[in-house]
Image (cartoon, rainbow, N blue to C red):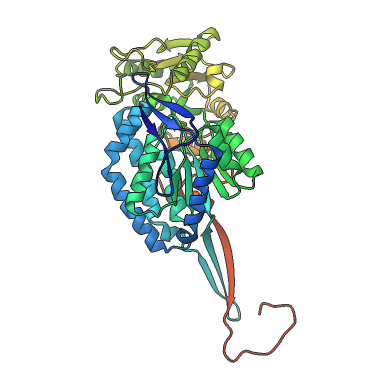
Amino acid sequence: MKTINHWIGGKPVEGVSGNFGPVYNPATGAQEKQVAFATADEVDAAVRAAREAFRTWGVSSLASRTAVLFKYRELIDAHRDEIARLITAEHGKVHSDALGEVARGLEIVELACGIPEKLKGELSTQVSTRVDVAAIRQPLGVVAGITPFNFPAMVPMWMFPIAVACGNTFVLKPSEKVPSAAFKLAELAAEAGLPDGVLNVVNGDKVAVDALLEHPDVAAVSFVGSTPIARYIHTTGTANGKRVQALGGAKNHMLVLPDADLDLAADSAINAAYGSAGERCMAVSVVVAVGDTADPLIGKIKERAGKLRIGPGDDPASEMGPLITKAHRDKVASYVTGAAAQGADVVIDGTGHTVKGYEDGHWIGISLLDHVTPEMDAYRDEIFGPVLSVVRVETYEDAIELMNSSPWGNGTAIFTRDGGAARRFQLEVEAGMVGVNVPIPVPVGYHSFGGWKDSLFGDHHIYGNDGVHFYTRGKVVTTRWPDPSDGGINLGFPRNH
C-alpha cells in the first residue's frame, strides 16, 4: 500500500512515528493509501528547516522570489490535470470540479507573482528639515497553514504562495484525509526552484496541529475548517503569542425575492447547494423564499434535481460524487431523517442513494427540505452535504432578521431584479461576502475571502490585500541625512520645523 510521507527541507522524508491514517477512495469505499502521522519532533524538524531557510529567503530580492513564482505558475498549469486527478481520487469530487479548484488556487499564485506591487510601501519626504519617513513591510519568519479536506489544493494555495512571496517560510499541515495534492504542490515548488526548507509539508492529526500552535518559532498560523476547530486554533495560537487567521464554518442563505428570475434562481440553488456534494463552506444550504416564491421555486428545483447524475468523480458523465467518509455520509443522512421527525417536508430524500457497481462507496443523493424553521437541527447546524432547506418568510424584513440572527456570517446571496433592494441588502446583511444574483460569491484573487461572526476568528481575511498584511508586519523608518554644512551640538528635545 502506498504511503504518503512528509516533505521537509526540500525532499520527501519518511515518517518515523509508526502511526498512519487511512486514505480512502470515496467512490469505492476502499482504502488505497495510508498517510504517516507526524510526531512533535517531526514537526519541529520541519520548523527548523523553515527557520534555517528564512535566513536567506527572508532577505532575498523580490526579483528572485517572483522568478520562482512565475515558474511555479507554469508548472501548476502544466500539471493541473494530474493534480485534479489526485483530488478526485481522495476527495471524490468530479474531475471538472477538481479542475476548477486548481484554477482558483492558481489565481492566488498569479497574485503572488505580482508581490512587488503589493510591497511597495510608502514614503513621505521632507516631513521636517531634511527628514524623510518611509513605511515598509517585512516578513514574519516561519508561518504555518492547517487546511481542510474539501479543497486539498486550492486552500493551501490561498496561503503559502503569498506567504513565501512576502519572504516567509512555510509549514503546511494538510488534511490527513486528502494528503496527495499538497505533497504534489511541494514537489512542483521544488522543481520551480523554491529553495530547500521554504515550503514544508507535515501530515498528521491533532498532535501535529498542537505542535505547530505551541512551537515558539512559528510566528503565525492560518486555518480553514469548522467553527469549533477554528475557535480552538485561534484561542490556542494566540495564547502562544501567534498571529492567527482562522476561517470557520457557515450556514449560507440565498434570499429570493418575488421579482426574481426563478429559472436563474433555481439553477443557482442547484449549483450552489449540490456542487461538490455540498462539502464547501460557501455552499448555499438555505433558500429564504419571500412571499409566494416558494412553491414555484421548489417545483423548478425539484425538476432540475431529478436530472442530476451522481457517480464516481473520474466518470465524465458524473455531476456529483460521493462524500468524503462513510461516517460523514451517515451524519448528513441523519439530518434529513431528523428534519422529517421535526416537522419539515422532505420534498426529495437522497439518503438511500447508491451507484451501481460502487455499492460500497460513500454515496448519498441530494435532499430538498421544505417548511424548515429556525428551531430545526437541519437549519441550525452546518450539515456540509447535499441538503438544501427552504425557509418561507412573508417580507424582506423578515428575511433580513432571520439571516442576521444566524451565528455565522460567511457568504450570502440575493436574487432580484430590483437594484434598490439589492443595494439595501448588501448594506444590511451581516456577512463577509455577498452575491447579487451570484450564488457563491467567492472573491477573485485580488480581493480577500472571509466571513463575519463565527465564520472568522482573527482580524484578517485570507489572500488579497488582507493576506499580504497578515504575512507581513509594518515598520516605519525615519531618516535624516544632514547637509554637509550642518553641525554643532543641541541637547534639546527634537522639534519639527
Q: Position of residue 430 (x, y in %)?
A: 56, 35
Q: How many marks?
A: 0
Task: Specify the farthest residue to the top.
Answer: 341
Please tell me whether residue 95 is drawn above or below residue 129 in the rendered image. Answer: above
Residue 268: x %, y % from top left: 37, 28
Q: Is residue 401 in view from this perspective?
A: yes
Examine the rendering and report whether any part of residue 99 can be seen: no
Query: Can you name the residue that lies furthest to the left here?
Result: 316
Q: Please tell me which residue is depicted at 47% across the width and 31% down the height of the picture.
A: 281
Q: Looking at the picture, how far across and down is residue 246, in whole percent?
A: 55, 39
Question: Residue 468: percent from the left, percent from the top?
Answer: 49, 53
In this view, 23 is above or below 490:
above
Q: Which residue is depicted at the point 42% across and 15% down?
A: 367
Residue 310 found in image quarter:
top left
Query: Which image quarter holds the N terminus?
Result: top left
Q: Residue at x 47, y 20 (%)?
A: 328
Q: Nearer the viewer, residue 396 or 14?
A: 14
Q: Front-most of 27 and 309?
A: 27
Residue closest to the far bottom:
485
- State the quadrant of the C terminus: bottom right
